[in-house]
Amino acid sequence: MKLALLSIGLLGLAVAGIAIKIWAKKGGEFAGTCASNNPLLQEDGASCGVCGARPDEKCKSEIQPLP
């Protein structure tokens, strides 16, 4: 039971940390969401599965950052 509570608490802290980072960052954009920004995929030359951007292109996603 202690392990489950500890795990839930740590997971909650991680989610809260990400939420605070998004909230505090100007524009509210989560950095690195496009797979073309992933250094591991850049080596393989793979394109983003969401927007289709190649590693040398900017994300083509139509999702706009929060105001």
Image (cartoon, grey):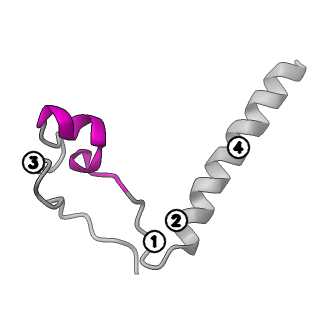
Alpha carbon distance from label 1 to label 2: 5 Å
At a point 58% along the width and 59% down the height, the residue shown is: 19
Query: Do residues under tags 1 and 3 come within 8 Å of each other at their CB atoms?
Result: no
Residue 3 is drawn in which quadrant?
top right
Query: Do residues under tags 4 and 3 come within 8 Å of each other at their CB atoms?
Result: no
Query: Do residues under tags 1 and 2 come within 8 Å of each other at their CB atoms?
Result: yes
Q: Nearer the viewer, mark 4 or mark 3?
A: 3
At a point 17% along the width and 39% down the height, the residue shown is: 49
**60 relative position to 64: left or right:** left
Alpha carbon distance from label 4 to label 3: 34 Å
Q: Horizontal and vertical percent for residue 52?
A: 10, 47
Is residue 38 inside the magenta stretch? yes
Q: Which mark is residue 12?
A: 4
Few, some or many C-alpha atoms within 10 Å of disc 4 (few <14, some 14-19, many ≥20)?
A: few
Alpha carbon distance from label 4 to label 1: 20 Å
Residue type at tag 3: Arg
Given residues 42 and 61, the one toward you in this image is: 42
Q: Earlier in the sequence, mark 1 or mark 3?
A: 1
Is residue 29 inside the magenta stretch? no
56 lies above or below 14: below
> Disc 1 designates what residue?
28
| Quadrant in which the N terminus is drawn | top right
At a point 21% along the width and 48% down the height, the residue shown is: 36
Q: Earlier in the sequence, mark 4 or mark 3?
A: 4
60 lies above or below 45: below
Few, some or many C-alpha atoms within 10 Å of disc 3 (few <14, some 14-19, many ≥20)?
A: some
Given residues 55 and 49, the one toward you in this image is: 55
Q: Earlier in the sequence, mark 2 or mark 3?
A: 2
Query: Do residues under tags 4 and 1 come within 8 Å of each other at their CB atoms?
Result: no
